[in-house]
Amino acid sequence: EAQVTQNPRYLITVTGKKLTVTCSQNMNHEYMSWYRQDPGLGLRQIYYSMNVEVTDKGDVPEGYKVSRKEKRNFPLILESPSPNQTSLYFCASSLLASGRTEQYFGPGTRLTVT
Amino acid sequence: SQQGEEDPQALSIQEGENATMNCSYKTSINNLQWYRQNSGRGLVHLILIRSNEREKHSGRLRVTLDTSKKSSSLLITASRAADTASYFCATDGKQTGANNLFFGTGTRLTVIP
């Protein structure tokens, strides 16, 4: 089954404790993105990757890192999480750049930073 | 910000009625997409309309695009309780290219059985 998986689905952590949210897709998609969703603000793009070893900043990249060492994986790294990073995070992948084709979204990771 | 804006923020209708949601955006686009999100879950793509298209249909969905007014509408005909969800429009930016997708804040649709 074609899908985007994220882990963990729920995470509660404390300020400053480094964490990684994994994202994997099985559709051989070139393009992957990370978004955060906050009430009243909609979805905002954090980072995207057009291919292996190619990543770029989205709308709200501060406080986040990403890597794309393999085509299927695109982990999101929070080196020193802060409470303002409490949010619902989505990974997405698409065959082409996100504006040109449908994106497939993962189920989401709900992160709480205390 | 290039973020789009949906209107209304919330809509409640009876099953069988039609639901219309609107989206306005600020900058020129290549494409506009509509997505659906069931509460707390991942978004699901509904339809993509290109800037040179004016109308597109998919099953009970009808999307229009007016680039002169920088607006789009999503019509769901003969609504069902299962259509209850949030609906988002998303635009790319002609100036930033198709790599960035900007989402609106969504319309929360409730279909009452």
Image (spheres, coloured by chain):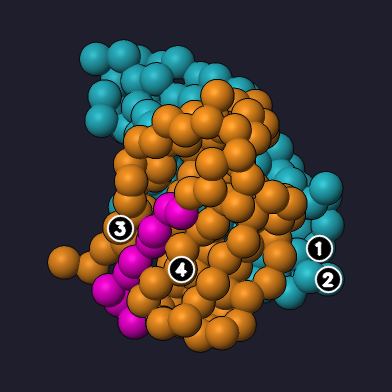
Chain colours: A orange, B cyan
Residue, disc 2:
B95
Residue at image coords 41%, 82%: A70
Which type of secondary structure does the marked residue at label 3 adopt? strand
Farthest front residue in view: A17
Are the residues flagged by discs 1 and 4 from a single subunit?
A: no
| Chain designation of label 1 | B
How busy is the neighbourhood of tag 1: few (under 14 within 10 Å), some, or many (20 plus)?
some
Q: Secondary structure at mark 2?
A: loop
Q: Which residue is mark 1?
A: B28
Q: Provide the residue span drawn in magenta.
A: A20-28
Q: Work out whether residue B47 or residue A111 is closer to the camera in this orientation and state it.
A: A111
Residue B14: % across, % down: 35, 15
Density class for disc 4 (Cα within 10 Å; few <14, some 14-19, many ≥20) is: many
| Marks 3 and 2, how far apart at CA | 31 Å
Q: Nearer the viewer, residue A82 or A31?
A: A82
Chain of the residue where label 2 is placed in the rendered structure? B
In the depicted structure, whether residue A47 falls above or below residue A30:
above
Instruction: Indicate the amino acid at tag 4.
Output: Phe
Is A90 positioned to the left or the right of B78 in the image? right
Check disc 3: other Cα within 10 Å, few if <14, some if 14-19, many if 20+: many
Q: Residue B6 appears at what percent x and percent y?
A: 65, 35
Instruction: Kindly identify which residue carries mark 3.
Output: A5
At x 27%, y 63%, the residue is A3
The foreground one among A1 and A68 is A68
